[in-house]
Image (cartoon, rainbow, N blue to C red):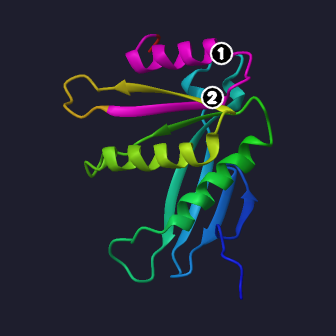
Amino acid sequence: MEPTRLLYKFSFEGGHNNSYIFRTDPGISYQIKFKPSGYLVPDEPFAEHVFELVLEITENPGGGSIRYDPLVSATVACIVLDFYNKSKKTITIYMCDSSDRRQEARRRKFDQWFCYFAQNDFAKVEFYMAEEGETVTYRLSVMIWLDNPDKLRIFSAFEQLARGVGK
């Protein structure tokens, strides 16, 4: 009897965006990127440790919508943990894309991933932003190691960014 698989095999491809890739059993390919994003807080000493988490479907042979697959959540969670294990100073931001008005579904999915791997080792703070004149609110999540000594300064900087201070 074959043991139950808990996640998909993934590989770190590296590059400028610190990319990881994996493929599901139905043949759907994902790329997870950690894009350097220090430009958001350029005057902060921790700017070089800021990365935007980006999840992309790079291949969907069946086309159309993708069915829920619990191994995808587990794999993404393990990829995030793998990236964080490279540096205790890592700061990840995640913005829910709102172009198709599905930002709340993305928020719930991100929260599910966070709960899957975070346990007691990570802190996450959420901020809400709205462009002037826009009715859509964007959610920005900031995640760090819980023992990051700069956590208050980090969260304060992103709160100011969300409020539009310093633009």
Seen in the picture, residue 119 relative to 116 is either above or below; the reply is above
Disc number placed over residue 38 in the picture, else none: 2
- The answer to whether 94 appears left or right of 51 in the picture is left
- The answer to whether 92 appears left or right of 100 in the picture is right
Pick the quarter of the image with the C terminus. Answer: top left
The answer to whether the residues at label 2 and label 1 have Cβ atoms under 8 Å apart is yes
Q: Which residue is mark 1?
A: 44
The crowding category of the residue bearing disc 2, from other C-alpha atoms within 10 Å (few below 14, some 14 to 19, many at least 20), is: some
Q: Position of residue 5 (x, y in %)?
A: 66, 73
Q: Position of residue 10 (x, y in %)?
A: 69, 66
Chain-order first, disc 2 or disc 1: 2
The structure residue drawn at horizontal position 37% and vertical position 45%, both measured from the top left corner, is 97
Q: Position of residue 46 (x, y in %)?
A: 70, 21
Q: Which residues are magenta?
A: 138-165
The crowding category of the residue bearing disc 1, from other C-alpha atoms within 10 Å (few below 14, some 14 to 19, many at least 20), is: few
Seen in the picture, residue 3 relative to 112 is either above or below; the reply is below
Residue type of the residue flagged with mark 1? Glu
Total numbered badges shown on the rendered structure: 2
Q: How far is disc 2 from disc 1 in space, using C-alphas?
A: 8 Å
Residue type of the residue flagged with mark 2? Gly
The structure residue drawn at horizontal position 19% and vertical position 31%, both measured from the top left corner, is 135
65 vs 112, nearest the viewer: 112
Seen in the picture, residue 152 relative to 40 is either above or below; the reply is above
- Residue 51 seen in the figure: yes
